[in-house]
Amino acid sequence: MQNEPVQIKIYDKREKSTSTIYVEQLAENQFKCIDNDIFNCRLTLGTEFKTRTNEEGCHEIIKITKESGFITRRFFLTSQFRSSDYRLLGDEIVKNGGFWQVDFGGIATINLPKDGDFDIDKIFNIFDFAVNEIKD
C-alpha cells in the first residue's frame, strides 16, 4: 500500500538553502521523492533518503539510500511552442513511463526510465526544438 504524499522542508547544509518537496514517507525518517526538487539535483523522482530534523524543524539529509531509477534532465522552456505543445510532449513522456513537471513557469524537469527506449533528443530533433538544457 502506498502512503499519501506529504510535503516536507529540506535544508541543504552544503548549499545553505531550504526547499519544499513532496515525498512518500517510508519510515519515521525515511522518504521517497515523488517529484523533483528544483534546487537539489540529488533529490529527483524515486530517490530514497534518510533525514534528521534540525532545530528549525527542517529535514536534513543524512544519507541517500536508493538512487532514482530515472534519468533526469532539465530545460528552459521557450516561447517557440505553445503550452499545449508542451502538454503533448508531457503526455508522451508519461505514456513511456516517465514523469515531467514545470517549475517557476519556465523550467521543465523530465524523468525518463533508465531502462526505457524513449529518446527525448530524437523528439526534439523531429520538431526542430533547440533546447537550452540546464546542466548540473
Image (tube, helix red, strand yellow):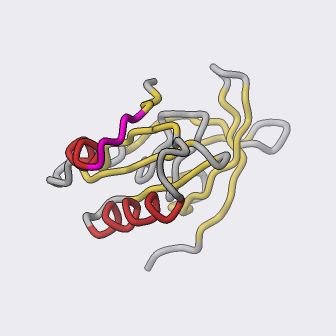
Q: Count the numbered circles shown.
A: 0
> Which corner quadrant holds the C terminus?
top left
Left or right, 73 with respect to 112, comes to right
Image spot of residue 127 (x, y percent): 29, 49
Image spot of residue 110 (x, y percent): 41, 49
In this rendered view, identify the residue nearer to me: 37 or 11: 37
> Which corner quadrant holds the N terminus?
bottom left
Left or right, 57 with respect to 31, comes to right
Image spot of residue 74 (x, y percent): 45, 38
In this rendered view, identify the residue nearer to me: 97 or 24: 97
Q: Residue at x 67, y 46 (%)?
A: 104
* Span of residues in magenta: 127-131
Q: Identify whether 41 is placed above or below 50.
A: above
Q: Identify whether 13 is placed above or below 39.
A: above
Q: Residue at x 52, y 48 (%)?
A: 36
Choose top left, top right, bottom left or bottom right for residue 92: bottom left
Tell me, yes or no, if residue 50 can be seen here.
no
Q: Could you tell me what secondary structure mostly forms the magenta stretch?
A: loop
Residue lying at the far bottom of the rendered structure: 1
Q: Identify whether 104 is placed above or below 83.
A: above
Residue lying at the far top of the rendered structure: 14
Choose top left, top right, bottom left or bottom right for residue 67: top left
Verify whether residue 36 appears in magenta: no
Tell me, yes or no, if residue 45 can be seen here.
yes
Q: Residue at x 28, y 64 (%)?
A: 97
Q: Residue at x 36, y 46 (%)?
A: 68
Left or right, 30 with respect to 98, comes to right
